[in-house]
Amino acid sequence: MTFRPSMKSVLSNIRPTAPLIYAASRGLVADLWSVEASADARGEYVARDPRFVIVLGNCTSPLSLANGSGEDAQTVRAVYIPASVPVSSRIAGPTTFEHLDLHFNARYLASRLAEMGEPSHLLEQPVYLTEDSGVLAIAETLAEDIRRGTAGTVLLDCLALGIVAKMLAPRISVQSDEPLRGGLTQDQLTQVDRLMRTEMHRRLPVSEMAEQAGLSESWFAHAYRKTRGETPHRALQAIRVDTAQRLLEENRYSIADVAVMVGFADQAHLTRAFRSVTGETPGHWRRKSMSEQDRTISDSFSQDNVG
């Protein structure tokens, strides 16, 4: 089922200059806004979901944000705002500009962060960036794909998660490389997870995962289960099913093609694994997803203009 963000806002002297356009996946909605701000433009926002906001364009960002009342607001190019944290904005108007907003399902974002080998507590505090050319470059690429209608779910997730990784990177502390007793180190987990994701399209034996971690096959299997609470095979199957869901949402490939693309022997193999993870067949899941996407997604902002 497609994720639907929810946010309340009260705006003054800010209005859209073009219809909202967006791209969406199961756990993410990316909104592209074109807005005009008059003098003394301001807003108050609070959202149920965590979100990232990036001001596009090469000119100096006109947006200033602060928690709560708006006092001591700072100019930002990009900001991460945790779920349910109220913020206020001030805009140096009159001006027009575009901004890209990434609204995440909280559990989806936490799971993606875990796959990167990073703790979910990184999502608890806001991040304000005055300028960041790397974040802006990814955001501009994603915005252009949204304009063209070419931001499929896989591309959307990859670019959005690139923004997440870059924005949270300064807060990622150096983690201990000491494993849990009998488990794997963080570096070993990262290497194995990367191998699973890049090579999921083919047969990937546990022996190859063990080699990546620098362990014997038997010890690796034991250590992986000790650390992750599941077998390497089960973890790989979950990654394949998750990727299959995103490909099915795009509705560009047959179920049989998706099965091969993510490393299953055939459609029947995908169907068995898909049902074991989601409780549904790929066909039923796709029909539900397409039906949901065919409905109009409510604007991410429920906007009340004042003044």
Image: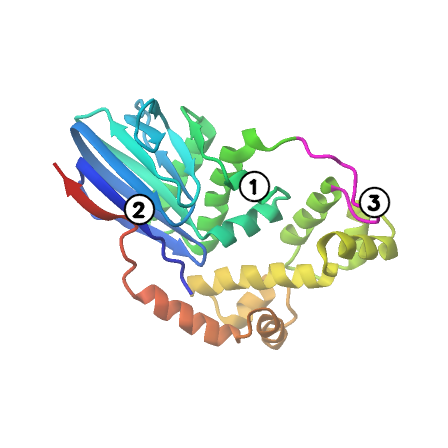
Identify the residue position indicated by label 2 in the image. 147
Q: Would residue 124 be counted in the magenta stretch?
A: no
- The span from disc 2 to disc 1 (Cα, nearest Å) is 33 Å
Which amino acid, by three-letter code, is at mark 3?
A: Gly
Tell me which residue sits at (40%, 37%) in the image: 139
Closest to the observer, 223 or 72? 72
Q: Tell me the SS state at disc 2.
A: helix
Tell me which residue sits at (54%, 49%) in the image: 110
Q: Would residue 181 be counted in the magenta stretch?
A: yes
Residue 225 visible to an observer of this rendering: yes
Identify the residue position indicated by label 1 in the image. 121
Question: Where residue 54 sits: x, y (%)?
Answer: 37, 35
Tell me which residue sits at (67%, 59%) in the image: 236
Looking at the rendering, the stretch of residues picked out in magenta corresponds to 174-185
Identify the residue position indicated by label 3 in the image. 214
Q: Nearer the viewer, mark 2 or mark 1?
A: 1
Q: Tell me the SS state at disc 1.
A: helix
Which amino acid, by three-letter code, is at mark 2?
A: Arg
Q: Is residue 17 left or right of residue 124?
A: left
Closest to the observer, 34 or 204? 34
Q: Tell me the SS state at disc 3.
A: loop
Tell me which residue sits at (86%, 53%) in the image: 219
Q: Earlier in the sequence, mark 3 or mark 1?
A: 1
Closest to the observer, 254 or 278? 278
Q: Earlier in the sequence, mark 2 or mark 1?
A: 1
